[in-house]
Structures are given as C-alpha cells and as structure tokens.
Image (tube, helix red, strand yellow):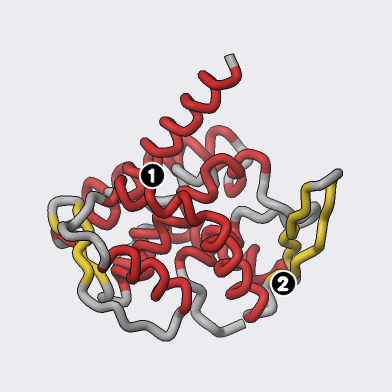
C-alpha cells in the first residue's frame, strides 16, 4: 500500500483495535478531537491554511477532497481568523460527517472495512482493519522516529498528536519504554529548530489536549 495516508486518516487508522475492530477504548473519548486537529494539519501541509499567533488563516478554498472543501468552506465564512482551539470546538459539531469521510478514505485505500452494527434503535458502522501489515509498519516507523529522532515537518507534527490521542500506551505497553518515549518526544520538541508556522502547527496538539480535558470534565460533571 504505497498511497500516502493523510494525517487524519492515519491517526484514525492507528486508533482501531487490530483484532476486535472499533476504536480502542483508551482513545475513544479523544479520537474525534484529534481527527479534527490532524485534519487542520493536513490542510496546513497542503498550504491551504496557515497559522499566525495560533489563529487559522485560509489561503485557498479549492481542493479535490470533499472533506477539505467542507472545512475550508466553513473557515472562509468567518469575518476574522479564529484560534485553533475555536475551530476544534466548532468542527466538533460536524464530527459525524468528518468521521464518515475519514472512514471512506480508508475504505477506498482498502485499509479497513465497515461492519453494520445495531443495538436497540442505535445503528453505527464499526471499522475493522483489513491490512494489519500497514498498521504494524506504521507503529515501527513511529518507534524509529521517536527514538532515532526526525526533522521531517510532517513526522514531527504527527508525533505531537500521539499523547493527546492516548496512543503511546498502545504503542508501548511496557511502562518504562512508554516513559522513555515521552521523554524523547519532549526533547525532540525542545531541540528541533522549526519555523514559527510549524511551531504553531505542533502547538495544535496542546489545544486538542485542552479540548479533550474540558470535554471529559463536562461529561463527569453532567453525570455527578
């Protein structure tokens, strides 16, 4: 499978349980926020948007990708640039459409299939991995990038989303190795001299983490 995988599809694919299907339990609550964040990064890498002082500036509304056009259309309607965290919150209202489009992209690449599921009146589509070799190769590449280091812009951006997506526990089941991975990621952020635009892009993961924490706190308060 030689087709490049956009970041939003990549993070979603990585979150699917290789044996049981469905999103891994540890990543369920964070996944929709993280997918939105990586979707913004896909647009950034394609030079459709840029970041200035953690605000999103639209550079182009043209794209061959339906999901990208959807997001670009929403962004182009606002009168003034909004913060990354604001767009994560706003686009969360369209999470079903965004998730469906990400799933369709992975189905088209023959990486997953969708199983129809139903419980009482609730219906949904469960993602099941078809190509586990791609998944395990992806994990191996992530491990190499973390411990050997990388200066590639796209790789640095993707690595910055692993903790907000609760992926490190999945990649490193050994607690000690997981701790080492976190330290390597921290040092990588400190040592890499990246442009201001890339630094703002990487900072999106922090905005996502804050959104996930706020959502979890709101859910806990509603249940108490």
Disc on res. 192: none
138 lies left or right of 37: right
Toward which corner of the image does residue 137 lie, by quadrant?
A: bottom right
Which numbered disc flags the more N-terminal residue, 2 or 1?
A: 2
Instruction: Tell me the residue that label 1 is attached to.
Output: 208
Left or right, residue 72 beside residue 31: left
Residue 218, x across and y down, in percent: 48, 26
Q: Nearer the viewer, residue 96 or 195?
A: 96
Q: Please indicate whether residue 43 sits to the left or right of residue 52 in the image.
A: right
Is the C terminus in the top left, top right, bottom left or bottom right quadrant?
Answer: top right
Secondary structure beneath disc 2?
A: loop
Q: Nearer the viewer, residue 66 or 36?
A: 66
**Residue at the spot of label 2:** 131
Picture coordinates of residue 156, whole percent (x, y): 34, 59
Q: Residue at x 53, y 66 (%)?
A: 9
Q: Is residue 167 above or below residue 156?
A: above
Where residue 206 sits: x, y (%)? 33, 42
């Amino acid at each position: 499978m030689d087709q490049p995988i956009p970041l939003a599809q990549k993070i979603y694919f990585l979150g699917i349980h290789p044996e049981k299907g469905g999103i891994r339990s540890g990543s369920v609550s964070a996944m929709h926020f993280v997918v939105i964040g990586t979707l913004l990064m896909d647009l950034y890498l394609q030079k459709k948007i840029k970041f200035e002082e953690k605000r999103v500036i639209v550079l182009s509304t043209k794209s061959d990708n339906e999901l990208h056009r959807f997001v670009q259309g929403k962004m182009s309607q606002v009168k003034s640039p909004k913060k990354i965290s604001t767009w994560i919150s706003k686009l969360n209202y369209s999470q079903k459409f965004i998730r469906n489009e990400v799933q369709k992209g992975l189905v088209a690449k023959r990486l997953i299939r969708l199983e129809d599921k139903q419980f009482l009146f609730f219906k949904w589509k469960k993602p099941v991995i078809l190509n586990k070799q791609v998944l395990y190769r992806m994990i191996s590449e992530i491990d190499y990038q973390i411990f050997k280091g990388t200066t590639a812009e796209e790789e640095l951006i993707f690595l910055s989303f692993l903790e907000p997506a609760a992926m490190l526990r999945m990649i490193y089941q050994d607690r000690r190795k997981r701790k080492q991975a976190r330290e390597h990621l921290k040092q990588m952020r400190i040592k890499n001299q990246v442009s201001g635009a890339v630094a703002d892009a990487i900072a999106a993961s922090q905005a996502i983490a804050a959104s996930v924490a706020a959502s979890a706190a709101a859910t806990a308060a509603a249940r108490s």
